[in-house]
Image: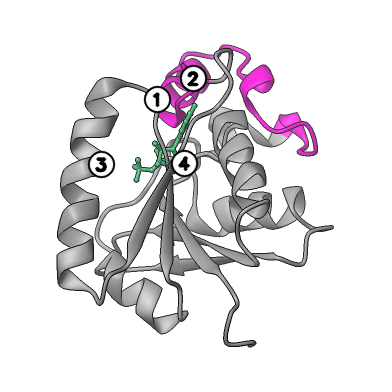
């Protein structure tokens, strides 16, 4: 690692990773030397898609991009950033309420750490309404959410059968 390397973590649940996330991460790659996608999870609370699938999908989308790595983590985001020598937290903003929520977390994270800086990016207007929650709802009700899923992925993976619910 060079001393001046700018390292960011991009934390989230990515359940699943959408075109909105992809835009934020690709834009972040213009700003940072390395971006570590951190899939925050809780061992006692399962997501909609299994953690292993969520990791695999992001690795697949960025398989040609050596600046991206994907890691699952539990616990405080500031500890995750410290472990990976990151100086920045990358997050996206969609709405004004996102901003209020993110501002509080970013300021707390900065206080808890040694000046860890949060960087917020916007997507294009078409991508602003894309959320994992809506994508999950579409899938849960048998709809086709493929336009909200990054192009590189096999769309057949995004069905209820591949979710945690489908396995029950
Ligand atoms: P979390 O549950 O921590 O918000 P998400 O996986 O939902 O995790 O999102 C990760 C990050 O990506 C968040 O900063 C979120 O605001 C951002 N994001 C997700 N979708 C969009 C979008 N369509 N436009 C801008 N930012 C987005």
Does the Cβ of the disc 4 residue fall within 8 Å of ligand 1? yes
Q: Residue 138 in magenta?
A: yes
Does the Cβ of the disc 2 residue fall within 8 Å of ligand 1? yes
Q: Nearer the viewer, residue 91 or 38?
A: 91
Magenta residue span: 128-156
**Helix, strand or loop under label 1:** loop
Q: Is residue 118 above or below residue 81?
A: above
Measure how far apart labels 4 and 2 are at the Cα level: 17 Å
How has the structure been colored for display? one colour
Which residue lies at the image location 39% right of the left edge and 25% below the top edge? 94
Q: Nearer the viewer, residue 141 or 106?
A: 106
Mark linked to residue 102: 3
**Helix, strand or loop under label 3:** helix
Mark linked to residue 94: 1
Image coords of residue 92 (percent x, y): 44, 38
Task: Give the mark toward the camera: 4 or 2.
Answer: 2
Measure how far apart labels 3 and 4 are at the Cα level: 19 Å
For label 2, count other residues whose C-alpha is less than 10 Å away and answer few (under 14), some (14-19) or many (20+).
Answer: some
The residue wearing badge 2 is 128
Image coords of residue 56 (percent x, y): 66, 56
Q: Nearer the viewer, residue 168 or 107?
A: 107
**Helix, strand or loop under label 4:** loop
Q: Do the CB atoms of the residues marked 2 and 3 lie less than 8 Å apart?
A: no
Decide which of tag 3 and tag 4 comes sooner along the chain: 4
Q: Do the CB atoms of the residues marked 1 and 4 lie less than 8 Å apart?
A: no
The residue wearing badge 4 is 15
For label 4, count other residues whose C-alpha is less than 10 Å away and answer few (under 14), some (14-19) or many (20+).
Answer: many
Measure how far apart labels 1 and 4 are at the Cα level: 17 Å
Does the Cβ of the disc 1 residue fall within 8 Å of ligand 1? yes
Image coords of residue 143 (percent x, y): 57, 11
């Amino acid at each position: 690692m060079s001393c001046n390397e700018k390292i960011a973590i991009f934390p989230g649940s990515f359940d699943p990773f959408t075109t909105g996330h992809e835009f934020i991460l690709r834009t972040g790659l213009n700003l940072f030397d390395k971006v570590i996608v951190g899939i925050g999870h809780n061992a006692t609370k399962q997501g909609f898609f299994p953690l292993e699938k969520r990791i695999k999908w992001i690795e697949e989308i960025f398989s040609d991009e050596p600046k991206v790595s994907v890691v699952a983590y539990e616990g405080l985001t500031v500890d995750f950033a410290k472990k990976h020598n990151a100086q920045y937290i990358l997050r996206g903003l969609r709405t004004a309420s996102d901003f209020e929520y993110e501002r509080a977390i970013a300021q707390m994270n900065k206080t808890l750490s040694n000046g860890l800086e949060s960087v917020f990016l916007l997507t294009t207007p078409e991508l602003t309404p894309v959320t994992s929650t809506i994508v999950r709802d579409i899938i849960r009700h048998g709809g086709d959410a493929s336009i909200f899923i990054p192009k590189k992925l096999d769309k057949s993976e995004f069905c209820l059968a591949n979710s945690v619910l489908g396995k029950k």
